[in-house]
Image: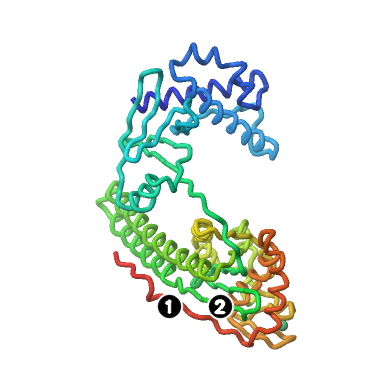
Amino acid sequence: MLGELLDQFTASVNFCIKKCLEHNITSRASLHHVAYSEWKSRFSLATHWFHSAGQVATQTLRSWRNLCRKGQADLNKPPVYETKTMRLELWSDKNSTGICKFQGNTVQIRVRKGEHLWLPLLVTKHHEQAYLRDWREGKLKVGEVTISLSKERANIFVPFKREVKSKHINGVCGVDINERSVDLTILKLKEPPKHVKIDVSKLPAIRHSSQLKRKSVQKKLDTPPQRPVQKQKLQEKYWRRESNRTNQILHTVSKQVAEIVEQEQVAVAFENIKGIRGSMRSMKSTNGKTLRKDIRRRLNQWPFHKLQFYVDYKAAQRGLPTVEVSNYHKSKNCPICSQYNRPNGHAYQCLRCGFEADRHLVASWNIAKDGASHVPADCWQMQRAADELVAQAKLPAEPEKIPKQQFATEF
Ligand SMILES: [Zn+2]
């Protein structure tokens, strides 16, 4: 039944795409005008299915046109919607024509007049504690539900929206993400800068050990008699285990950062890491050579984006904004006098004013300084704060360390 619906939805989207192209239409409203009656005669579904399909179709076409403009897609080959996924408009007291209703442990779908489909949900303790309780109390709202089908089970994504009051902020926290540590510098008005180092050296250790494990499995199962099925199963298992362990640490670390940020009531500033993988290719090690292939691979596997994403949403949940600053010379310019220096290994020393510190700390400090000029409007005075603080900072700066023992990871 669900598979049938998905097929119908996919066909509807492709029908809409075709109509849009035929009539040169870009909006959902004009699509309705042109194609609705034909759609209604072809598909026996409630009217709102047409709206949901039309939305997907117009969005698909928009991104396809953008790709064509950039020369990454062919104008003569229009897109075909093949994904077994449907996003359904919500049906509520306000929007009585929606097709999908979330009811805690089931999702109700209106197929056509008088015909409904109920999908039971597997609700875990985590879902209950994190979302459902607040949803019942009206603290959370539900967004558009996405349903997809894979092999034998359906995945149902229910986005929850929480309205958060944005808090008044008294400063900026610069976050520098490194392979073995996450460094924070907190700049606040009339207070000396505070530095925090969170040890994440467990991450590369996990990756290294599971790489060895996978290698040995491969070696063992490649010697005859070959067992490809078993090999794949085992390798998948170790991949999964690695990603579970990594994710747990990322969640713990991002929560720590969010809690510090909440306690201090400061905005979060990140380095813009777009293109970090590309820049690594041209990055030079201290002896002037390009980085070795294995080092590049190691750095490439570092989940920068994931950690940023987690910190970002965890800060947002607490009503604190995040800003992104450029990554230009963040670990090279002196935070005190702005002199350009090349750090030597982990140590940073300014040749002009003599400031000495850990290079990661310098980076997070510079990110915080830069972030101060990007934070939202009500904090326009932050730039001054950053400058003032620099003047009264004590040298050399020592970070407060959060040791790795804090992660109780047992597997
Ligand atoms: Zn200096």
Q: Position of residue 318 (x, y in %)?
A: 50, 59
Q: Position of residue 76 (x, y in %)?
A: 65, 26
Front residue (pair 301, 263): 263
Front residue (pair 129, 154): 129
Task: Establish whether ligand 1 lies closer than 8 Å to the Cβ of label 1.
Answer: no
Q: Is residue 390 above or below residue 119?
A: below
User: Which residue lies at the image location 51% right of the left edge and 62% below the top edge?
Assistant: 297
What crowding class fits label 1: few (fewer than 14 Cα within 10 Å), some (14-19), or many (20 or more)?
few
Marking on residue 403: 1
What element does badge 1 sit on? loop
What crowding class fits label 2: few (fewer than 14 Cα within 10 Å), some (14-19), or many (20 or more)?
many
Q: Position of residue 207 (x, y in %)?
A: 41, 65
Marking on residue 103: none
The amino acid sitting under disc 1 is: Pro
User: Which residue lies at the image location 38% right of the left edge and 74% below the top edge?
Assistant: 406
Furthest residue toward left: 225
Rendered image coloring scheme: rainbow
Task: State the separation of the CA atoms marked 1 and 2.
Answer: 14 Å
Front residue (pair 344, 9): 9
User: Which residue lies at the image location 63% right of the left edge and 82% below the top edge?
Assistant: 348
Residue under label 2 = 195
User: Which residue lies at the image location 49% right of the left edge and 59% below the top edge?
Assistant: 314
Tell which circle, 1 or 2, labels the residue nearer the N-terminal end.
2
Q: Quadrant of the C terminus?
A: bottom left
The amino acid sitting under disc 2 is: His
Q: Quadrant of residue 17?
A: top right
Nearest-to-viewer mark from 1 and 2 = 2
Question: Would residue 130 appear left or right of 38 to someone viewing this image?
Answer: left
Q: Are marks 1 and 2 in contact (CB under 8 Å)?
A: no
For ligand 1, give the image quadrant: bottom right
Q: Quadrant of the N terminus?
A: top left
Q: Quadrant of residue 187?
A: bottom right
